[in-house]
Image: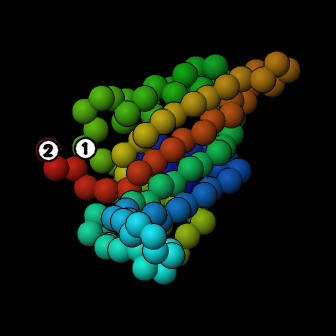
Amino acid sequence: MASIGGTDLGSVTSERQSKVAQLFQQPLPTQNSDKAILLDIFGLRRNITLNGEFVGTLVEQNTFIQAIETIQNGTQEGATFVSSHTSTPNKVVFIDSFEWDVQKGTPTKIGYMLTLIEGASTA
């Protein structure tokens, strides 16, 4: 079961994680790419993208949406993300974006996409 900040994320249909190096890159004029200066001085960033479905009554759907939006409140301090797909599931994350939709003919189900960034608060 996947969750964020203690909120159950329902059925996670896909989870994508990427870890990106923030490399300083400086190609040199008149030189091939093997002569470019690369410095690993900016650290790493992990992005997590979740797609899922939440099934429930209209009240339960609204409670789910409100719980996620409360975490993403404009003054985030980080929430614990528990993944059901990785061997190291607990990560402190910030919510970068939260999108949800309702499809015609499925009033008890909402689809969502949640984009998270791993990190620690400096506040």
Query: Circles 1 and 2: CB distance less than 8 Å?
Result: yes
Q: Which mark is residue 77?
A: 1
Mark 1 neighbour class, 10 Å CA radius: few under 14, some 14 to 19, many 20 or more: some
In the displayed structure, does residue 63 sit left or right of residue 36? right
Q: From this viewpoint, is residue 87 visible?
A: yes
Q: From this viewpoint, is residue 90 visible?
A: no
- Position of the N terminus by quadrant: bottom right
**Label 1 – label 2 distance at C-alpha:** 7 Å
At which x and y percent is residue 121? 22, 50
In the displayed structure, does residue 40 sit left or right of residue 59? left
Please name the residue shown 61% across and 29% down the image: 100
At which x and y percent is residue 80? 37, 54
The residue labelled by disc 2 is 123
Q: Which mark is residue 22?
A: none
Location of residue 102 by image quarter: top right
Choose between 69 and 44: the one closer to the eye.
Answer: 44
In the displayed structure, does residue 119 sit left or right of residue 6? left
Q: Is residue 28 above or below residue 56?
A: below
Q: Is residue 112 above or below residue 118?
A: above
Residue type at mark 1: give it.
Answer: Glu
At which x and y percent is residue 83? 53, 60
